[in-house]
Amino acid sequence: MTLAVELRGALAAMGIDLPEARQAKLLDFIGLLKKWNRTYNLTAIRDEKEMLTHHLLDSLSLLPALGESALAGRRWADVGSGAGLPGIPLALACPELKLTSIETVEKKAAFQRQAKIELGLDNLAVENRRVEDMPAGGFDAVVSRAFAALSDFVHLAGHLLAPSGRLYAMKGVMPDEEIKHLPDGWSLHEALPLRVPGLNAQRHLLVIEKA
C-alpha cells in the first residue's frame, strides 16, 4: 500500500476531508522531513510510514477533536515545535489558520523555514527564539506536543495568550498529577480523547484556560 493510499484511508477514518492537493502537500512534508532527517537528526523516527502515523496523523488529530472553526482565521502558536509538529501539518490542512512556530534550536527552525518555502506556506511564520522571550498577548491559542509538564507549559507560554485565549497540550495517557499541579489562576477546561489510526497508544488533548 502506498503512503498516499494510507493517508487517504486514515483521513477518511478520522473524518477529515482534504482536497487531493493538500494531501499531496502533507506527503511532500513527510518527504522533506525524511530527507533532512538523514543529516540533521530532527526526529528519532526514520521510517516514512511511522512518520505518517506518529507525526502527521497525530498532529492532524486535533482537527476532528476541535473542529475547523477553532483554527480557521485564528492566530495559533506552536511552542517547542521541533520539526514543526503539530504546526506545519495543521497549517497545510487549514490554510485559513495563522500559525507561528516557535523553536529555539536553529537546525530545527531552519528545517521549518525551508518547509515554509518548499510547501508554499504563506500562513506560517517561524520564530527561532525562546518561548519566554516572545511578546505577550499575540495569540488566540497556543499548542504544545510533548513540550513540557503542564505547569511549565503555563509558566513559559501562558503570557502569549490574548484575552479568552486557551492553551492546548497534546499528551499521551491522562496526566492526572500534572493537572493537580496547574499554577494558581489556571484550570483544565476539558480533556478530549484523540484518535490516531494505526497508533496503539492513548492520546489526549488538554484544554487549559485562565480560571
Image: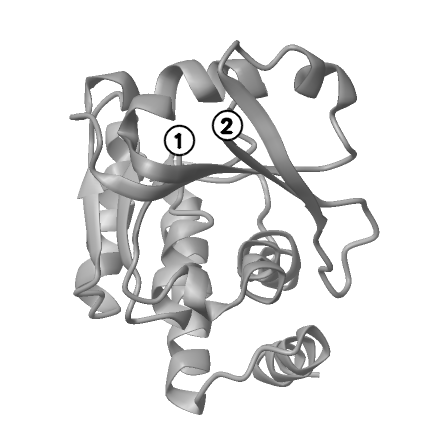
The answer to which quarter of the image holds residue 187 is top right
Which residue is under mark 1?
80
Identify the residue at horizontal 37%, vertical 70% (top origin). 94
Question: Is 123 left, or right, of 184 in this rendering?
Answer: left
| Residue displayed at 55% across by 59% down | 66
Q: How crowded is mark 2: few (under 14 residues within 10 Å), some or many (20 or more)?
A: some
For the N terminus, give its image quadrant. Answer: bottom right
Question: Callout 1: helix, strand or loop?
Answer: loop
Residue 207 falls in image quadrant: top right
Position of residue 1 relative to residue 153, above or below, is: below
Residue at 72% across / 78% down in the picture?
13
Out of 136 and 93, give the one closest to the viewer. 136
Picture coordinates of residue 158, whole percent (x, y): 37, 24
Label 1 with label 2: CB-CB less than 8 Å: yes
User: In the image, is residue 155 above or below residue 80?
Assistant: above
Q: In this view, does 201 lie above or below 144?
A: below
Q: What element carries label 2?
A: loop
Q: For the point 26% across and 69% down, which residue is it?
A: 119
Q: Residues within 10 Å of mark 1 (few under 14, many from 20)?
A: many
Q: Is residue 151 left or right of residue 15?
A: left
